[in-house]
Image (cartoon, rainbow, N blue to C red):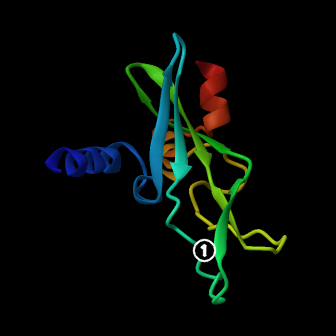
Amino acid sequence: MESLETIRNLLGVFFPEEISTHFEIKEVIEKSSYIQIVFEELPELIPPQMDKPIEIVLDGFRNPLELQSFPLKGKPVYLKLYRRRWKYKGEKAHYSNTYKLNDEGVKATKEFASFLKGAFGQTPDQYNRDR
């Protein structure tokens, strides 16, 4: 199991802690002009507000959140994060966990957006237009 621990440590180097601890990689798509990494929220992370002693069931995913992150291999990296939905069995209301992975209105991880602002004085959109 050492290799699993090594992979988790590596994820922590490349991605924000909230992503590396709450999501798992499902797919890596490498194209000639970009890399997309698809994540799914771990199924055991039931939202804390679901505290009734009623059976809880998974109920699909929310719309994916797509964020740009630090480049790898000279290519832009896009993270596609699928956040799960849960509900109480027999009810219609859905519950999801909340994460602060990006600042409002910014389609990049907080760390990447902060780096671009500090290094180049640009937002991710400005940086992408100038490339």
Q: Which residue is mark 1?
A: 47
| Quarter-of-image position of residue 49 | bottom right
Rendered location of residue 41, percent (x, y): 54, 55
Front residue of this view, candidates 118 and 70: 70
* Residue 113 at least partly seen: no
Q: Residue at x 65, y 74 (%)?
A: 56
**Residue type beneath disc 1:** Pro
| Quarter-of-image position of residue 117 | top right
Q: Residue at x 65, y 78 (%)?
A: 55
* Residue 36 at least partly seen: yes
Decide: is 31 above or below 53: above
Decide: is 22 above or below 37: below
Rendered location of residue 98, percent (x, y): 63, 67
Q: In which quadrant is the C terminus drawn?
A: top right
**Residue 121 horizontal side relative to residue 11, left or right:** right
Q: Residue at x 62, y 26 (%)?
A: 128
Rendered location of residue 61, percent (x, y): 69, 52
Front residue of this view, candidates 124 and 20: 20
Q: Residue at x 58, y 62 (%)?
A: 100
Front residue of this view, candidates 28 and 14: 28
**Residue 14 horizontal side relative to residue 118, left or right:** left
Q: How many marks?
A: 1
Front residue of this view, candidates 105 and 64: 64
- Residue at the extreme top: 32
Rendered location of residue 59, percent (x, y): 71, 59
**Residue 100 horizontal side relative to residue 88, left or right:** left
